Amino acid sequence: MSTLLEVSGVSVSFDGFRAINNLSFQIGQAEMRAVIGPNGAGKTTFMDIITGKTKPDAGRVLWGDKSQSLLAMSESQIAQAGVGRKFQRPTVFEDQSVADNLMLALRKNRSPLSVLRFRASAQDHGKVAEIAQEIGLEAALHRKAGELSHGQKQWLEIGMLLAQDPQLLLVDEPAAGMTPAEREHTTALLVEAAKTRAVVVVEHDMEFVRRLDCKVTVLHEGSVLAEGTLDRVTSDEKVIEVYLGR
Amino acid sequence: MTDTAPSSLSKYSGGAGAEPPRLATPSGGAKPLVQRHPSVLIFIGCLALFTLGITILAEGFGIGVISTSFVKTLGKTLCLCLVALAMDLVWGYTGILSLGHMAFFGIGGYAIGMWLMYARTELIVVESLAQAPLPPTPQEISDGIAAQIFGVVGASEFPPIWAVAHSLPLQLAAVVLVPGLIALVFGWLAFRSRVTGVYLSILTQAMTLALALYLFQNDSGLRGNNGLSGLQNLPGLGDVPQSTVSMWFLWASAAALGLGYLFCAWIVSGKFGSVLRAIRDDEARVRFLGYSVEAYKLFIFTVTAVIAGIAGALYYPQAGIINPAEIAPIASIYLAVWVAIGGRGRLYGAVIGAAFVSLLSTWFTGGQAPDINLGPYTIQWVDWWTILLGLSFVAVTLFAPKGIGGLIVIIERRTTPNRHGADLGPDPGALREKEAET
């Protein structure tokens, strides 16, 4: 399996605090990975680095077959290259309809001039309807995203990610604030997505991670503490110490 | 709700399979602009009726009930509505609170004013030199024009920026290009450095202040604080009465406003408008969707600067004079106030705000408003108008953030509830009170 994303020796500090310390991480083309770790372990910073929001002080972030460096690219370029990100707090455009939100995310030319000339074809509308169905919002297509419930917003954001059709999906605590029923649905969506692309899920909830049934990377103080199956990492001495020791 | 958990996924697909899913409901896209935005048609209709009405009532071609000076006021108001549209596009839709757009408006005015002044002075100079025994050389004519125009600031030579002032097409190009280029360079520097929010507003204020201060200098090449004057006289058309000229400009301003409205409606409808509003609401999220936020901001900033330039080029020939005070920072703040009072994020809101506030301002400051005698103190509206305006701005911001345009929305909602029959309750499995309690 070829590597899609390779992060090696990355460090970043904020005002002297080392948020990420010599972190290395790899993920393949179609792989699900859960990233866990206590608060302040650097999970969100890790995502910020991959998506270009934060520039690391040292290290490399290489992407795709051509081993392109993501460090020289802007957030929008990285997103266009195929990295999709879902935030912990659902961020959808509340003032716009569900259909508009999905249409915005749909994989299309993003340059201003081509967007200005853009006319949604029947195919595009079909794709939007298809995704809406997948996330259970087909009846709410023309409602404003702001009217949706918290769980529906989470799904809409996942739907937007699917519409973006990224090669790598970074998902930050997708199950936060969801009911068990909604979690079930979210798990199914993510597992399905991981069949064709790489998915990195940052999660606190061990039960959710267990359901994902994938390789787990444990972060601690900005670097990788352990990696392997959930059972293996949870029986790891160091992990137990970090999670329960203090 | 937990008992339905395992069936959650299948329930959705099953529900959609039972009845044909609402696939490909072309809510936008295919329909023409006016059908998607009926307000465009209403607006163009109102504008046409207004123009026709004024044409009939004015002196130029009608029965003469309305004075020429009032026609000019109305024509100028239409130009202010146009620049308010630009402001709404950049602020109301994209969320960039630019407090410098009146600078572009002024630049447009200067650009057209240079040709007007040059061409008219040329006619006068040629006429006066015609009496001379020898026919004047082009250099003599040029020197004569320069002496006429720049005598007031103690210069007698054309500064380099007047190089194309003799040519109407080139100065018309400058109306569009100069504001566009300045906005492009300024915007590129500001947006590239991710300057946003109040810092960007301050930067735009600094830009307009710097421009005004520069123009106040006598050696700026634009006659310092004298500005350009006599712009109401069209070169070569001295015989045409102002009552007729004022109508021409009214029509031109109305046409520009109509076209500007159509253009803005086209920009904000569809996906581009969707991106703009998304940038306004959550810029970072738009970046992670793969849109280059900076490119969009730069595009809209430049386009609106061009619109402002065109509006200014139509405004100042009706005003007759332009001087650097017109570019003072306060002018751009007024522009923001009009749009806020009218209702930002709605094109008609911007137009209503600009028309309403600027006409009211003309009325109050023109001495027509009756002073209020409070015994020991008399409220003179010429002085108190600004305070009233400031108070209404505060009131609108606090109590009616949608402005006057918001009233129209309220009326609309009353007549046609905006519910499309979709389920309004929480989705199956959402956190209900029962679960929240446990």
Image (cartoon, grey):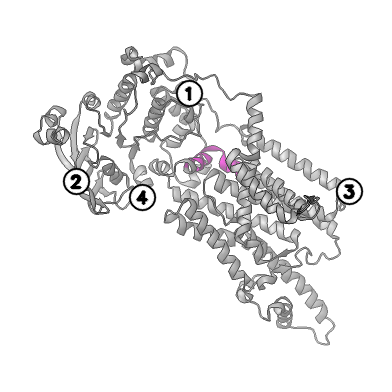
- Circle 2 chain: A
Dot 2: element:
strand
The Cα–Cα distance between marks 1 and 4, rounded to whole angstroms, is: 34 Å
Residues at discs 4 and 2 in contact (Cβ within 8 Å): no
| Residue B143 or residue B51, whichever sits in front | B51
* Residues rendered magenta in the picture: B263-278
- Residue B101 falls left or right of residue A57: right
Which-is-in-front pick, marks 1 and 3?
3
- Circle 3 chain: B
- Circle 1 chain: A
Asked whether residue B271 is drawn in magenta, I would say: yes
Q: Judge the density around disc 3: few (<14), some (14-19), many (≥20) Cα neighbours within 10 Å.
A: few
Which-is-in-front pick, marks 4 and 2?
2
Q: Earlier in the sequence, mark 2 or mark 1?
A: 2
Quarter of the image with the N terminus of chain A is top left
Dot 4: element:
loop
Asked whether residue B283 is drawn in magenta, I would say: no
- Residue A69 is situated, as x and y percent measured from the top left of the image, at 27, 50
What amino acid is at disc 1? Ala
Q: Judge the density around disc 2: few (<14), some (14-19), many (≥20) Cα neighbours within 10 Å.
A: many
Residue furthest to the bottom in view is B133
The vertical placement of B268 against A175, above or below, is below
- Residue A240 is situated, as x and y percent measured from the top left of the image, at 13, 32
Can you identify the residue that label 4 sits on?
Answer: A74
Asked if labels 4 and 2 share a chain, the reply is yes
- Residue A66 falls left or right of residue A53: left
Can you identify the residue that label 2 sits on?
Answer: A23
- Residue B390 is situated, as x and y percent measured from the top left of the image, at 64, 50
